[in-house]
Amino acid sequence: MALPVRQQIIYWSAAAAAFLIILWFLGEVILPFLVGGAIAYFLDPVADRLEKWGLSRALATTIISLCVLLVVVIAGLVLIPILIGQTSDLIQAAPQIFQQLQGFLIERFPELMDQTSPVRQSLASVGETLQSRGAEFLNTVLSSAVGVVNALVFVVVVPVVAFYMLLDWDNMVARIDELLPRDHRQVIRKLASEIDNTLAGFIRGQGTVCLILGTFYAVALMIVGLQFGLVVGLIAGLLTFIPYVGALVGGALSVGLALFQFWGDWWVIVAVALIFQAGQMIEGNILTPKLVGSSVGLHPVWLIFALSAFGTVFGFVGLLVAVPIAAMIGVLVRFVLSQYKKGLLYRGLGKQEDD
């Protein structure tokens, strides 16, 4: 006999509360395991494809791990030093950029830029603020990544966790399936399948889109000669995870830097703007329809709210779990609404004429 609905709600609510409490107290401890699990989830379809080609799961996992290790080593030796250098240069150049902007505004709008004008005072302080805060932020990121979070343990634990979770992914899913309540197994399987489809379409698909667009922006901007092209491309690629935000922020930042660097060479400034226009066309017409699909079920506003809420409460770990939990809540809400529309509360006892 199934448990009463009220008791089931109590048990599931207690489980959700326990998960949030564990996330709150063990955030930094479980961070490597969350990252390793996310990597394993992302690469599981690749391992399944290699298995279909005749490879064993162990061999497929080993090949994938070696390829990922090679990419990480190349990035660490080539891209990361350049990225850190460009970020530092951009922070140092911030005061000069705002001084040039101030000179442009004084020339075009002298009545707005007198000595007591709030606009002039703000522009004079923004550059110095960005320089000081930016350097502080960069040092904080580097120190937190190296010291506070214990980078050595992180770098060692994440690959090991990802390797073993990727190796045993199908077995873990089977073991979890065995533990499902018998009375609700089919419903839970259906909901889990919808959640997996949502995550697969969004995280794997959108993650691939971010990687492709970030690479495209960085390479294209560096080809046209933009001084901080790699940084801008990385920022635009990462923010593409949130629909429309990456293109807006990356486009505005790159065009602003192009105006500062190529003032008078309008064809270069137009070329920078066209790069982001081309990126948007590629994303909207090719990448997103092919890799993400149109029925992911994560509205941009809901996604931004989830990232903001979980990031504020749980920090960086909250950002990692925000999208999966948002997808799970979205699927559960759609399920509850479908059940509500089948019930008497929505349908009533008989046909009612509209008033």
Image: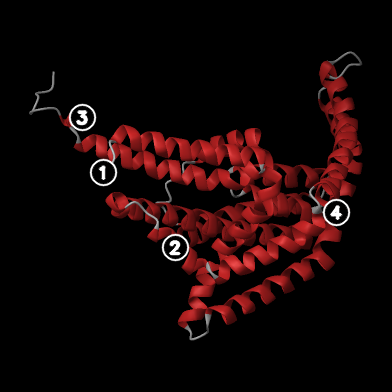
Q: Residue 84 carries which label?
A: 4
Q: Can residue 128 be seen in this view?
A: yes
Q: Name the residue under label 3.
A: 346
Mark 4: give few (<14), some (14-19) or many (20+) Cα within 10 Å: some
Q: Which mark is residue 320?
A: none
Of the two numbered discs 1 and 2 on the same chain, state the one appearing first in sequence: 1
Mark 3: give few (<14), some (14-19) or many (20+) Cα within 10 Å: few
- 74 up-or-down from 317: above or below: below
Kindly report the distance in space between the C-alpha atoms of the residues bearing marks 2 and 3: 38 Å
- 118 up-or-down from 191: above or below: above
Q: Which mark is residue 175?
A: 2
User: Is residue 323 or residue 217 the one in the foreground?
Assistant: 323
| Residue that protrudes farthest toward the top in the picture | 116
Asked whether disc 2 touches disc 4, contact meaning CB atoms under 8 Å apart, the reply is no
Kindly report the distance in space between the C-alpha atoms of the residues bearing marks 4 and 3: 58 Å
Of the two numbered discs 2 and 3 on the same chain, state the one appearing first in sequence: 2
Three-letter amino acid code of the residue under disc 3: Tyr
Kindly report the distance in space between the C-alpha atoms of the residues bearing marks 1 and 4: 58 Å
Mark 2: give few (<14), some (14-19) or many (20+) Cα within 10 Å: few
Three-letter amino acid code of the residue under disc 1: Ala
